[in-house]
Image (spheres, coloured by chain):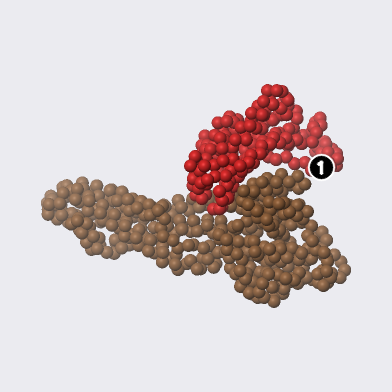
Amino acid sequence: MKHLVLALSVFPAALSAEQTRSLDAHMHGAGTLGIAFSGTEFSLSLEAPGADIVGFEHAALSAEDRDLVQAAISDLAKPLSLFVVPNEAGCTVKSANVALAMAQIGKHEAGGDHSDEATEGHAHSEDQETRHSEFHAEYLITCQNIDAIDSIRFDYFERFPNSQELDVQVVSPKGARAYEVERSAADLDLRGMF
Amino acid sequence: MTLFRLAFLSLKSRGMTVGLTILAIALSVVLFLGVEKLRTGARASFTDTISDTDLIMGARSGSVQLLLYSVFRIGNATNNVTWESFQDIASRPEVSWAVPISLGDSHRQFRVMGTTPEYFERYSYRGGRRLDFQQGRVMSDLFDAVVGADVAEQLGYKVGDPIIVAHGLASFTEHEDTPFRISGVLEKTGTPVDRTVVVSLEAIEAIHVDWQSGAQRPGAPTSADRLREMDLQPAAITAAMLGVESPLQIFTVQRAINEYPEEPLLAVLPGVALQELWGIVGIAETALVGVSAMVVVTALIGMSAMILSGLNARRREMAILRAMGAGPRAVVALLMIEAILMGAIGSATGVVLLYLGLIAVQPWLDYTYGLYLPITALTAQEGLLLIAVVAASALVSLLPAIRAYRMSLADGMMVKM
């Protein structure tokens, strides 16, 4: 009987689906950062859950929330104070793009299943919207002496107290490597990548 | 200095036992360093399977899985990538080149891969080496195939031979109506390419023209000439190798692919996926190092036992030394110097044996297993390991040395009748 009910509730939804539905794995506390070195420049590509950056993921409706988002975006626009490279490298930001992306899955019907929320590890009790927000940022940085970058200090964790870790992928002429930088060990050792 | 000479001469006088002990140490050192060389060599060989490809794109699954089926031809894809999506990604301004690959058919025990001729220009391994042809050249006709070195060797193929491609992996249904001709044989690379039959992407489509739902369509098969005239644009591919215009854009392209709205796709950086895969394999590696380290320890304990058992036989020697004015400390020093000498000679012999062995097996390993072991000088870490072996010899000799010290205080001086 249980199976039948399940089948009935799934089928109409499947038949009426007109658009593709997909939702990224979204884990609070963890973001991703890509760093690519080439010539005298490097690019940074950051993706972090709204919960890490501003502490909430619903649309910023109150003035207070909007201020938080504004402050976060303006701080995110200064990548070199979040990801600190040695002074000797003489780096300056060439471009910075920060965006707040809302991920939303369809409309929520009564009794619909919440399986798409399973990945996030907590249930919304009051907030019934299946909504996640993510901050996306892309930076291009140019340096006078890029070889001096032997490590990057992640002050990012200090600025955003809800963030716990960043999965970092680094690409350099020497190849590609993955690292995990955590709040407790917020330094990325890049020796061996040049 | 006298002690050193004494120790050396004493060892020399017991040539057979000492020789065997040194041999045991030498062999354990060979094993230990050999495992180390093999480990780093295997890792490098493995990492060298693919280079100069910025991203690998496939259906959304796991990064390791995508790497395994697209590069190592292990396992199968969960899904295909539609041709439309591939075209869409390939035409992005950041993408400088894109080589599609299509897997799923086989020839005997070897995988058949459909791709474009650009594959031979783009695929590189071992730090930028390109694929070379032993004989023949890239396929030019629809039914041309290029085979890897292992395929050619094991099946005795040469340019011009016909081959039949089987549908799926088990060759229960062969595409007998569409025979291929070998247009080229690749040089040995030590990568999975050696075990691959490469055909054009259109050829993969062509051999499936007369097949529906996995079974051959009744009626006369479409002739080869008719197939050549057909539009054989594939509907889907298995995966694609991508290169970007500038490394700075790798992550932009990766994100665009991972968030591609029309189809669930996944793009991975080959180096990162290899690292992830090696992290899984790495446990066995650690176990191997542990076992070989235990062998060194065993050899050293053997040496300690040898010195200890020799003590009784050398009572007289010790007594004479004492009578000649050597203090008990000198006796301890003598035994320790003997052990250090054995450890050092054993290690040195081990290193010599290791390099002789490496020179002997290197070509064979490269040819048979595609495992290239570069013959390089000992690394600082390996040097430290050798010093550790010598230091450990001194340490394990403490037990017999202390015993000899105690014995020599009284033993041999007293008259025992």
- Of A129 and A82, nearer the camera is A82
* x and y, in percent, of residue B265 in the image: 71, 48
| Dot 1 crowding, Cα within 10 Å, few <14, some 14–19, many 20+ | few
What's the residue at 54%, 45% (across, down)?
A143
- Of B100 and A194, nearer the camera is A194
* x and y, in percent, of residue B301 in the image: 34, 52
The amino acid sitting under disc 1 is Gln
- Of B261 and A84, nearer the camera is A84
Residue A103, picture quadrant:
top right
Task: Output the chain of dot 1.
Answer: A
Judge left or right: residue A32 versus residue B318.
Answer: right
Which residue corresponds to mark 1? A19
Q: Is residue B352 above or below residue B137?
A: above
Which element carries disc 1, helix, strand or loop? loop
Figure chain in red: A
Q: Is residue B49 above or below residue B163?
A: above
Figure chain in brown: B
What's the residue at 15%, 54% (across, down)?
B321
* x and y, in percent, of residue A48 in the image: 64, 36
